[in-house]
Amino acid sequence: MTRRGKQGAKSWPRHRRNPRFTATKATPGLQLSCRYGYLCMDVRGTVFNYYTCGLWTVSNWWGTGPWINNQTKGTVARFYRQSGNELWRSTAYSSGTADWAPVYSLRPC
């Protein structure tokens, strides 16, 4: 396993497994899309689509990429540092670009 944040890392961004979650390789040149009810993000070419509430631990996330919070209006997604302190939050509907390096866990809702 490679060290987190190392630019030469060959590890894919990872997550805990859950049936209410998908991760697929992004199609080069296409914009990120996100179905209603989901929190979606592109981390180094892997698209993550979160539907289930709960705390998700992630690893090997670095670089910048787009995100879309297309959950039910007013639903708040939270992103956390390694310490567990909140890094930032997003209220649906919203979108933007994030630096994934400091993100160690997230709560879609």
Image (spheres, rainbow, N blue to C red):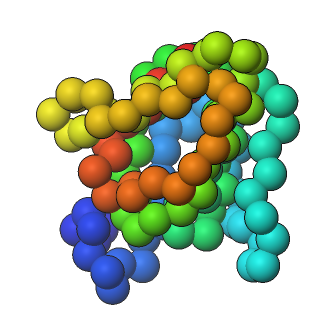
Residue 54 sits above or below residue 24 on the image = above
Front residue of 93 and 13: 93
Q: Is any atom of residue 43 visible in this view?
A: yes
Residue 21 sits above or below residue 102 on the image = above
Front residue of 7 and 91: 91
Q: Quadrant of residue 101?
A: bottom left
Question: Would residue 96 appear left or right of 61 to someone viewing this image?
Answer: right
Question: Would residue 71 appear left or right of 103 to someone viewing this image?
Answer: right
Q: Look at the image and tell me in which quarter the N terminus lies.
A: bottom left
The image position of residue 35, as x and y in percent, is 84, 37
Tally the numbered discs: 0
The image position of residue 19, as x and y in percent, is 70, 29
Identify the residue at image location x=58%, y=50%: 96
Residue 42 sits above or below residue 107 on the image = below
Q: Look at the image and tell me in which quarter the C terminus lies.
A: top right
The image position of residue 43, as x and y in percent, is 53, 60
Identify the residue at image location x=27%, y=68%: 5
Front residue of 1 and 21: 21
Q: Quadrant of residue 94?
A: top right
Q: Quadrant of residue 38?
A: top right
Question: Would residue 7 appear left or right of 38 to someone viewing this image?
Answer: left
Identify the residue at image location x=40%, y=44%: 58
Identify the residue at image location x=46%, y=65%: 64
Front residue of 8 and 72: 72
Residue 49 sits above or below residue 77 on the image = below
Name, please, the residue furthest toward the left.
83
Q: Is any atom of residue 38 visible in this view?
A: no
The image position of residue 77, as x and y in percent, is 52, 25
